[in-house]
Amino acid sequence: MDQVFWLAPVTSIVRIGEGVYRVEMDERAEVVFVAGPPTNRWAFWNGLIFRGSRADQNPAARSGLRRDAHQELTAPMPATVLKVLVTPGAQVKKGDTLIILEAMKMELPLRAPGDATVTAVGCREGELVQPDAILVELE
């Protein structure tokens, strides 16, 4: 990932379509796709998916969150499952691609947020999944 992108000051954000934005910074322009309700947004940029919520911006809400070893990867938007690259019991490393989705004619790789063991896979190739559908469970 180009770390300079996140450090560069944003000079302009322009909405160019439903859920599509042009972000300009330091003589560069990037397209960012955003989906989800205002309290639970998903952004897709440069092959990566980012998820944020209003609770993430509230320190009081953050302090009450538990950090469990169990984690679920969910669909960020309506999509078709192109490839399932893991099976239950598989050991994965942070950044490993677990599932590849296709939405809006783009491939969306879902990556492991950390080292973990796959405990369940809740989708199959060719399946249409809805937002927040649980695709992979990790421990």
Image (tube, helix red, strand yellow):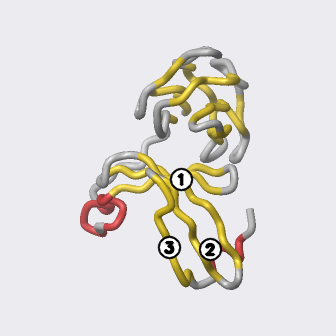
Q: Nearer the viewer, residue 11 or 92?
A: 11
Q: Nearer the viewer, residue 33 or 68?
A: 33
Tell me the element at label 3. strand
Residue 62's label in the rendered image is: none
**Residue 121 in view, yes or no:** yes
Tag 3 residue: 13
Tag 1 residue: 33
Give the residue type at disc 1.
Phe
Tell me the element at label 2. helix
The answer to whether 76 appears left or right of 45 in the picture is: left
The mark nearer the N terminus, 2 or 1, is: 2
Tag 2 residue: 6
Viewer-nearest of labels 2 and 1?
1
Q: CA distance from mark 1 to mark 3?
A: 12 Å
Please provide percent x and percent y for residue 107: 67, 38
Q: Residue at x 64, y 36 (%)?
A: 105
The reply to whether dot 2 and dot 3 touch (C-beta < 8 Å) is no
Please provide percent x and percent y for residue 71: 48, 37
Task: Give the image quarter of residue 110.
Answer: top right
The mark nearer the N terminus, 1 or 3, is: 3
Local packing at callout 1 (Cα closer than 10 Å; few below 14, some 14-19, many 20+) is some
64 to 57, vertically: above or below: above
Please provide percent x and percent y for residue 3: 71, 71
